[in-house]
Amino acid sequence: MHNFLPIAYFENQFVPFAEAKISIATHALHYGTGAFGGMRGIPNPDNPEQILLFRLDRHSQRLSNSAKFLNYDLPADKIQQVIIDFVQKNKPDKSFYIRPFIYTSDLGIAPRLHNIKKDFFVYGLELGDYLPPDGISCRISSWYRQEDRSLPLRGKISGAYITSSLAKTEAVESGFDEALLMNSQGKVGEASGMNIFIVRNGKLITPGFEQDILEGITRDSVITIAQDLGIEVIERPIDKTELLIADEVFLSGTAAKITPIKQIENYHLPSERPVTDKLKEELTAITENKTKKYQDWVYTINI
């Protein structure tokens, strides 16, 4: 049961969430011709009259870039302003998640991106921990991450998430919390909706963008934090066997934040996770606006 925020942005205006509805003939519903974003917000722990949004500018820019793949010009500054207005109208008092969505809103039946109306909506819901924060179990999915030559993987294109959905359900129905997808070269890609990191010999390792992964904003944040802490970060292909002998493995994402992995298939990983724990502690402090060095990552909205 989701607790949705009461106001949505729909068809260029703010309306009650229950009134924001689309037709069953909507083009994007049939062809996956949409793109979405996701960002977290929290009430400021030190000032209940303020809301803190994590990396609003980067999220807005990524969604604007995703729109380009749909042949739609939606400036990042417009997205950002709509989200600010959205938060001010809803005045959330708990941790929440914002879902902006771009889509082909015509009622046509031909799969295309030209000569078709596009639209943009925003809604939100209360959201605590997306995954168990103390650690999860994962299986290697039988489904593979798509290739950038077939789908624009640098955008969060809605149709691409059929693979994530198949992998997630396969994992959960076989007794695991989450799925890990290999890419078409047989290297580690990402989870169903998160990037992945491993720690070996004190070094933080993650697949590079050439491995057909999403340009994750939390991923980028983790890399920056780690480098500032003096942790060496290496972006390179990762073999499946490295997952099984890593000192630490964790996922990163807007919903997942930093979530440690405690088991992959039948392999149990070390319970001591000093690097993961330190990065998680730092990221939490940053999102709560308690670290001056990263204050430009946190957008403050007065409500």
Image (cartoon, grey):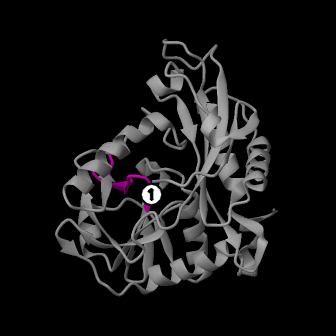
Q: The residue tagged with tag 1: helix, strand or loop? A: loop
Query: Residue 148, image x and y in percent?
Result: 45, 39
* Residue type pointed to by label 1: Met
Q: Quadrant of residue 191?
A: bottom left
Q: Position of residue 21 (x, y in %)?
A: 59, 31
Q: Quick one: which residue is furthest to the left in this view?
A: 266
Q: State yes or no: residue 60 in magenta.
A: no
x then y, percent, for residue 61:
69, 47
Quadrant in which the C terminus is drawn:
bottom right
Q: Is residue 28 left or right of residue 164?
A: right
Q: Residue at the spot x=42%, y=74% of the render?
A: 133
Depth order, front residue of 267/202? 267
Q: Position of residue 126 (x, y in %)?
A: 57, 59
Q: Which residue is mark 1?
A: 194
When asked about the image quadrant of residue 22, the answer is top right
Furthest toward the right, the residue is 302
Q: Quadrant of residue 292?
A: bottom right
Can residue 231 be seen from the camera position used here? no
Can residue 184 be found in the magenta stretch?
Answer: yes
Q: Which residues are magenta?
A: 182-195
Q: Badge 1: few (under 14), some or many (20 or more) residues near its Cα, within 10 Å?
A: many
- In the image, is 149 to the left or to the right of 172? right
Residue that appears at 47% across and 57% down? 208
Tell which of 297 and 36 is nearer to you: 36
**Relative depth, front residue between 236 and 225:** 225
Quick check: 265 above or below 123? below
Question: Taking 114 as reference, is 25 left or right?
Answer: left
Residue 33 visible from this viewpoint: yes
